[in-house]
Image (cartoon, grey):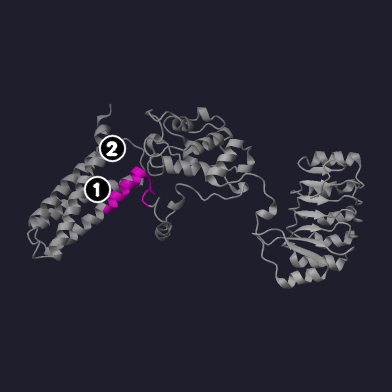
């Protein structure tokens, strides 16, 4: 048994003695200064209270020294906490000597010393709180405006702001780390790392603690961290030993993160997400892992009435795609379009995301302007005299998800163009000039793209 550490554990109890005595002395000193006639006889009580505070400070410093021998504390914070505590005891004895008249100084000197003692008690106590509970303990649950005034990052200490789109959610940064900071950071954080383990950062987890690595990538049940947080709460090794344990969702996400390789930089979409994890993410974190179309994830400026009027005068029918954003769906209201009419689309190059030019005698030269509609996601060009040369003008449409080329003159030469469309998911090529061999090559090159070349699944939305 480590008897010194046993005694050191009484530090939180003993440390309240100097705090209470010195604050009591400050209160009595304030009363005697403000209400001289009513509280003029408090000098003896004040000096005794300061003296008791001094002895308490010495006792706290001795026991605190024994506690610090157990290790696991931030050295810089511990240094200042220790020496400020020692300075507090020395100043308390000096203040007692002044207040009791053993050191001759002006009367107001005692009040100044008592004020300094209160300041030292506050600072030393705050540093002690940092050592015990973590550097952000004071502001973790403070109102948002208080955190902003303090310039504190404590708002995210217990939970980072989680992006709504899965592509932007970094599993460790947004899901795992906040839970570890909130539930385990007081004992295994930057200012205190019991057992030599810090679980609140990548560096700490990679380094591990006295018992070895905290995380074994791919093996949650061989990872010390996961084993500790899943032990029965009655176990002496259960973590955290005090406060709220990790919730079911936090445990399952931690297990999945470790099992998936414990990457510190991978996003949700870089690993296969089990159905249960998807459900927990939606229920407890508001993250919907279902794929969303491009137009639901970005915002564009609203198109002005003058620009809409130009499109309407060009024979184009313009409608908002849905409420909540400013994307537009456009189709031609005439039997055949001209290049000038197509060129008018450029006034809405950001807003047009669905475009229907089916059966409108669209030629290759007209597709130059269509290729500049940067947010186009659905394009219908079926039953138009379009060739491989015209299609090549669409290769920069990086967000195009659906392309209908049914009844066009597209051939196998367009395979290279299709390969340059990273968002493509549906491609209609029925009755085009692509060969059976070309279709098979295209399917091998783009396995994620649904290629429709016959009656099966030909309903075009």
- Residue 48 in view (yes/no): yes
The residue under the point 15% across, 65% down is 34
* Residue 339 in picture, x, y percent from top left: 87, 66
Image spot of residue 150 (x, y percent): 39, 58
- Residue density around tag 2, few if under 14, some if 14–19, many if 20 or more, within 10 Å: some
The secondary structure that dominates the magenta segment is helix
Residue drawn at x 58%, y 38% is: 277
Q: Quadrant of residue 384?
A: bottom right
Spot occupied by residue 167 in the image (x, y as percentages of width and height): 63, 47
Rendering quarter of residue 217: top right
Which label is found at residue 344?
none
Q: Which residues are magenta?
A: 122-138
From the image, which quarter does the N terminus lie in?
A: top left
Query: Is residue 129 placed above or below 214 in the rendered structure?
Result: below
Q: Which residue is mark 2?
A: 67
Residue at the (25%, 40%) spot, across then down: 11
Image quadrant in which you'd find residue 285:
top right
The residue to which callout 1 is attached is 85
- Towards the viewer: 337 or 198: 337
Query: What secondary structure is found at the residue carrying circle 1?
Result: helix
């Amino acid at each position: 048994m480590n008897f010194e550490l046993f005694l050191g554990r009484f530090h939180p109890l003993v440390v309240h003695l100097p705090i209470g005595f010195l604050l009591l002395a400050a209160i009595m000193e304030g009363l005697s200064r403000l209400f001289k006639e009513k509280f003029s006889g408090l000098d003896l009580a004040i000096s005794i209270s300061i003296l008791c505070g001094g002895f308490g400070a010495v006792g706290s410093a001795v026991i605190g020294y024994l506690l610090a021998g157990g290790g696991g504390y931030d050295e810089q914070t511990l240094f200042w906490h220790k020496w400020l505590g020692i300075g507090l005891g020395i100043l308390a004895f000096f203040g007692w000597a002044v207040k009791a008249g053993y050191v001759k100084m002006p009367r107001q000197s005692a009040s100044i010393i008592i004020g300094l003692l209160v300041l030292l008690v506050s600072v030393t106590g705050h540093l002690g709180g940092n050592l015990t509970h973590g550097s952000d303990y004071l502001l973790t649950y403070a109102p948002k405006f208080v955190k902003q005034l303090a310039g504190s990052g404590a708002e995210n200490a217990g939970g980072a702001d989680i992006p709504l789109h899965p592509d932007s959610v970094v599993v460790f940064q947004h899901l795992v780390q906040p839970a570890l900071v909130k539930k385990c950071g007081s004992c295994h954080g930057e200012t205190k790392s019991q057992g030599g383990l810090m679980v609140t950062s990548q560096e700490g987890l990679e380094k591990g603690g006295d018992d070895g690595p905290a995380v074994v990538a791919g093996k949650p049940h061989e990872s010390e961290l996961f084993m500790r947080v899943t032990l029965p709460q009655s176990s002496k090794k259960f973590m955290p030993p005090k406060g709220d344990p990790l919730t079911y969702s936090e445990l399952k996400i931690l297990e999945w993160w470790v099992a998936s390789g414990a990457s510190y930089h991978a996003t949700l979409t870089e690993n296969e997400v089990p159905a249960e994890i998807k459900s927990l993410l939606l229920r407890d974190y508001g993250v919907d892992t279902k794929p969303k179309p491009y137009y639901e994830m970005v915002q564009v400026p609203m198109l002005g009435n003058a620009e809409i009027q130009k499109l309407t005068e060009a024979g184009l029918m313009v409608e908002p795609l849905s409420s909540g954003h400013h994307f537009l769906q456009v189709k031609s209201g005439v039997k055949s379009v001209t290049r000038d009419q197509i060129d008018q689309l450029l006034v809405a190059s950001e807003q047009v995301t669905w475009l229907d030019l089916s059966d409108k005698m669209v030629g290759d030269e007209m597709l130059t302007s269509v290729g500049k509609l940067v947010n186009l996601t659905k394009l219908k060009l079926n039953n138009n005299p379009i060739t491989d040369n015209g299609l090549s003008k669409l290769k920069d449409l990086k967000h195009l998800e659906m392309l209908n080329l049914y009844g066009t003159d597209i051939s196998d030469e367009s395979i290279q163009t299709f390969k340059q469309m990273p968002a493509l998911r549906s491609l209609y090529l029925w009755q085009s000039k692509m060969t059976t061999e070309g279709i098979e090559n295209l399917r091998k090159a783009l396995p994620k793209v649904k290629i429709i070349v016959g009656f099966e699944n030909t309903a075009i939305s």
